[in-house]
Amino acid sequence: MTYPQDCWYVVATSDEVGDGLTARRIVDTSVVLLRLADGSVAALEDRCAHRPYPLSAGHRDGDLVVCGYHGCTYDASGRCVRIPSQDSPPPGARVRAFPVVERGPFVWIWTGTPGGARLRPPPSTPWLQGDGWSSVGERRRVAADLLLLHEHYLDLTNVFAMHPELVPPGIEALPPLEEVEVSEVSVSYRRELPAAPLAPWEAEVSGLDGGASFDRLETGTFVTPGLHKQTYTISGPGGPELELVRTHGFTPESSGATHVFLQISWRGAAVSPDAGARLAAVFHEMADRDVAVIETMQRCLDEDTTPRRYVNVKADRAAVRARRILTSMVEDERGL
């Protein structure tokens, strides 16, 4: 296994969990989600305790889930409360219920060690909950390992080869990655770009004068194995003019497959009224190219039977440290 299990991961967005049953496979575990009458979200193992049939193939009866095979019925705690063929369920008949925390737009889940969720909450994401911020998002499944995604987004020097139209005019290379902060469980970097005119997409979104020059600050953070945050701030003489945050919820489906929950958040004084649609289009196309490269790397790794050592460069400093943290977490769980 190439990812830790004792971690909060995004299992869905809030709008994905409604009146029906939502099935998802994460961390090699099948879960079924439902929104209860009180508005909260419940998550159960998506497998009947009687026979190996998915509960998500059944139906709801209020806040209960009814298996579509023999009608075994479960409450939100996972306890079997009814079996049509007999007067009462067998003692101990239940499926696992998972801790869930909903902080719009994400629904977080803990599928790791029972009780471990109480030791630490999901990461805080205040920029996704108002205070002048607006957000758009999408979800996609990427046929690649969680680690490849983190490493890719912790090194944006690929932008010149992969996304040249997004680079501000006159900037030929990103400044060296000198400021990298590392804690026991997180990695972050900071990079200041020289003043330059706006790229077309920056001018369209920000509402700023495309002929003027602006400073930019770019940061990236490996927050947890399940969350990556990147910020991009365009500043003028008076301070920030446009602030962008790209949030990735990375949730392993299994080794070699990852659900990516992407949110693009922005705020600024003169932002275009259609900024959301423009940003969604720009970052969707960017993600298409990123995913194609990441999935190709995964195929190369899967097909390569010859052990090899890849070369690291200065721009990999944050990615290398994130790899060490992930590896250490997995080894700790295995008792290595």
Image (cartoon, grey):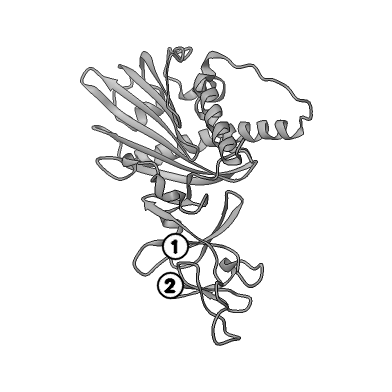
**Residue type, numbered disc 1:** Ala
Q: Position of residue 200 (x, y in %)?
A: 40, 25
Q: Quadrant of residue 55?
A: bottom right
Q: How many neighbours does mark 1 have within 10 angstroms: few (below 14), some (14-19), or many (20 or more)?
A: many
Q: CA distance from mark 2 to mark 1?
A: 9 Å
Q: Is residue 152 visible?
A: no
Q: Nearer the viewer, residue 44 or 16?
A: 44
Which amino acid type is marked by label 2? Asp
Mark number for residue 63? 2
- For the residue pair 230 and 65, the one nearer the viewer reads as 65
Vertical order, 196 against 200 (above or below): above
Identity of the residue drawn at 29% across and 21% down: 235
Q: Eyeballing the image, is 45 above or below 104?
A: below
The residue positioned farthest toward the front in the image shown: 335
Residue picked out by circle 1: 42
Question: Relative to the observer, which residue lies in front, 89 or 124?
Answer: 89
Q: Position of residue 148 (x, y in %)?
A: 59, 32
Residue 164 screen position, x and y as percent: 51, 22
Q: Residue furthest left?
A: 238
Residue drawn 55% across the image and 72% down it: 92
Viewer can see residue 189 = yes
Compared across the picture, whether 188 is left or right of 129 comes to: right
Q: Secondary structure at mark 1?
A: strand
User: Residue 190: percent from the left, percent from the top?
Assistant: 39, 20
Return the disc, 2 or 1, that comes first in the chain's sequence. Answer: 1
Q: Looking at the image, do the residues carrying marks 2 and 1 touch, with CB atoms under 8 Å apart?
A: yes
**Quadrant showing the C terminus:** top right
Q: Residues within 10 Å of mark 2 (few under 14, many from 20)?
A: some
